[in-house]
Amino acid sequence: MTKLIVEAHNATDLAPKDGEGSASPFVEVDFDEQRQRTQTRPKDLNPQWNEKLVFTVADPNDLLHKTIDVTVYNDRLGKSHRKNFLGRVKISGASVPFSDSEAVVQRYPLDKRDIFSQIKGDIALRIYAVPDYNETPIASNVEAVKNSDTPLREINPNRKIEEEIDQIPEPNFAADNHKTFKKKKKEKEVRTFHSIGTAAGGGGGGGQSAPPPSGTFSGVPFEAHQKPAPVFETRRDYAQAGPPAAAAAVMRMQVPSQNPEFALVETRPPVAARRGDKTASTYDLVEQMHYLYVSVVKARDLPVMDISGSLDPYVEVKLGNYKGVTRHWEKNPNPVWKQIFGFSKERLQSNLLEVTVKDKDIVKDDFVGRVIFDLSEVPLRVPPDSPLAPQWYKLEDKHGIKTTGEIMLAVWMGTQADESFPEAWHSDAHNISHVNLSNTRSKVYFSPKLYYLRVAVIEAQDLIPSDRGRAPDVIVKVLLGNQLRQTRPSQMRMVNPVWNEELMFVVSEPFEDFIIVSVEDRVGPGKDEILGRVILSVKDVPHRMETSKLPDPRWFNLHKPSDAAKEETEKKKEKFSSKIHLLLCLEAGYHVLDEATHFSSDLQPSSKHLRKQSIGILELGVLSARNLLPMKGKEGRVTDAYCVAKYGNKWVRTRTLLDTLAPRWNEQYTWEVYDPCTVITIGVFDNCHTNGNKDDARDQRIGKVRIRLSTLETDRIYTHYYPLLVLTPTGLKKHGELQLALRFTCIAWVNMVAQYGKPLLPKMHYVQPIPVKHIDLLRHQAMQIVAARLGRAEPPLRRENVEYMLDVDYHMWSLRRSKANFQRIMAVLSGLSSVCRWLDEICYWKNPITTILVHVLFLMLICYPELILPTIFLYLFVIGMWNYRFRPRHPPHMDARLSQAEFAHPDELEEEFDTFPTTQRPDIVRIRYDRLRSVAGRVQSVVGDLASQLERAQALLSWRDPRATAIFIIFSLIWAVFIYVTPFQVVALLVGLYWLRHPRFRSRLPSVPVNFFKRLPSKSEMLL
């Protein structure tokens, strides 16, 4: 007898059928009047089953004449009609191999049931036939293993229960079947073990997967057929002996465990860099994708089709079901289009390419002529070849006869490395209008060059207030674009006030803005009177390089607002006017922070002359994504995904792939690296501007990945699926997985190593630091300028993209983030606490052998003190080499457990996503305020205890307690004489032996120094 094995792996890009933009698919297989099905994967258009369905084949010769029907359905749980048709595949038994080794995973496109079915997607299957296994040798092996003296084996707790069940007489066949199934189910629950840590999800992107499937009637887990079904397994957690707690904490790095669903998945895509393909060196980190490019340049001498003698021509490029259309030109027999069309080779539906010229008409467009190309004759172009020269082609009518008119075309096969790729109209965007087509294209952007503007307001003279009998209360307001700063009121209320105050602004090239300085008198609450104003151009402000001397301050005339226009138009003699003393300069030696300093991607100063040479090259390959959530389910569509990457001042945006949950971009980008301690950020968004949406529509966030370059090995290719995690007011959600390829190449090893000894920021940040209170405000202003500038590009990189990539709300209060930071501190201090526990165990002789060895080491160091420092550094070297075995093998990613996001309380998330100022009800605000008061009270207690200990240390010599101070100074004198007359080695030996004394000589009471210190006075009793 033969067994037919049907492995249902996964499916991709299924049609949504539940009315919410998703589906709950399962696979049903029919073979020779046998029907089995897989489990249902709820709300997943890219499901993964990874189940084996086993069928019985009575006669292997009959398999050649039978058919295997594989059908995918949508499970409508809780409804009368239980399933919707999602597609089917019919496979002939003649194609089934009779060996497990010969079978491969194949992807089959899902077929329609009738012409009206809306079906799409494909399914991955692996089908083969094997002889039925003989159970007798297995039983003997089981008995042999049972009788062996295996020290580590699993005890089956259900064995006794099963023996009792076997002794019960079974009255009928149905009961016997029930008992047999119950036994099998129990046995399976006991002896099936899954390694959750190595489970990985697979998908249409080509990643391998093996998640542990749950047991069903028909679905047999893969592990059951990899070996001849062992009865029990040796459990690794029983066989492994754990290291001592303290030694493990000191010697080994601690890695917090997290949900496997949020973990990194390593992949092995067929990129050219791993195959050693020299022909694809430009795009060697991505999978090579071939496209058919059609360049429609222009036409000439087109015939007139209308009675009026006019012609409104346009070109239609058609390949199978895909059709691209150029713009139409009114009344032009010699039009020029210069448009390029790109058709993916994987989706070619015909061997003939048809380029048709038509005349735009109100009722029906007229046929002018066409040119047909056979795809087998299309040349292949490989960069860096020059672009293919377009040629003139004579138009033909529908019968293939040459007619009047010619069209200039160029047709070739290329890859995504072709320079025409970014500007081409792609076949997946066939339903996008020409107006919105630009919103789907890939582009590269550069942030504007930013500078800090320093305005020092020194003093003013000869001010003329409106009320001469009142002392003026004068302030200075400085306006630059949408940035407004003002000084404090002058301490001297007089007509010659003095401020000596500095104000900081952010400006960008080209310097088109104006600085408006106003001197105002506060005549009443909320009422200011302008005493004078001066308008200055940013272009006229001098630059300052690094630590050079500040430019000299200048006096400027103040003019009344009514007289400002007269001054520009009329040139009169110099008259008396009020003056203001200002110092202005553009700081070129600072780095303008536009993102959080903890994960900044650029640390270079503003001036090009002060920047360092690059130390390497960062290459990023945006490969694909899988299991994306349908973001447009309410519109009857799924997701229009694109990626944005930011490193330094360079931003990149991939093209938008429309209406798919498993997009494949395969685009590669390169950056120069100036500092290894920087971070690259990659975000995924859903494009909401593809179908003429309103301008105020916001692209939705799908997820973000941050990778620190210093954690990457040089010249190594990292290919992983990164989880796209998004924190929402309802909790943490996984919106899919993003597959990236990374490579960091170092071109200057000496410079890179030297970077670790240099300051992180330019010199000016340390010589003349910017006040901390101004940092957040300046960073916000820099982000506003960058967002405004990138929003004016075409296609625009919108404000929501920039805000999400730069983490503008990172500084806002979050109880969840505060908990995460506290846990980070405790994780770092856990190693120190482990060392203290280890020393305490040595002092109390918990492990006599270790304590004796420490005594020997201590005596050696006392006798040879020159070995102390070498021993310390040698110990650090040994710890580092020991930890090398446990070094991270994957780049870091968003950690849900470390972020305290996996089990965050809904109220904490609601508070985190609340606006500023709050919009919640007063009772909710009161509850949160009380909670914050309780937390702050605990912090206040800890700070108070710390202050008390410090004050006690200060009280040793302050004579606040005269008796304690006298005791301490007399004791210090005695110790000074004793240490002077006694060799230091003897003193260290005595102190060390006293500290390491046996517990028999120890007391449970606190020591004398501790008691003395706790009796010292603090200032806590002086507080009200």
Image (tube, rainbow, N blue to C red):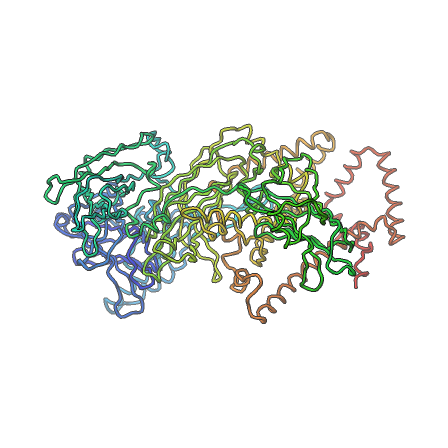
Residue 723 position in % (x across, y down) = 43, 50
Q: Is residue 844 visible?
A: no
Question: Is 356 drawn above or below residue 160 in the view shown?
Answer: above
Residue 703 position in % (x across, y down) = 44, 52
What residue is shown at x 57% (from left), y 58% (from top)?
814
Residue 868 position in % (x across, y down) = 70, 32
Asked which quadrant contains residue 862, the reply is top right
Q: For this view, does 786 lie left or right of residue 849?
A: left
**Along the line of sight, which residue is nearer the eye, 952 or 586?**
586
Q: Is residue 653 visible?
A: yes
Q: For this view, does 283 lie left or right of residue 35?
A: right
Quarter of the image with the C terminus in it: bottom right
Asked which quadrant contains residue 411, the reply is top left
Question: Is 488 drawn above or below residue 665 in the view shown?
Answer: below
Say how many tags the image has. 0
Residue 7 position in % (x across, y down) = 27, 50
**Along the line of sight, which residue is nearer the eye, 831 or 741?**
741
**Along the line of sight, which residue is nearer the eye, 334 or 431?**
334
What residue is shown at x 61% (from left), y 43% (from top)?
452
Q: Residue furthest bottom?
A: 923
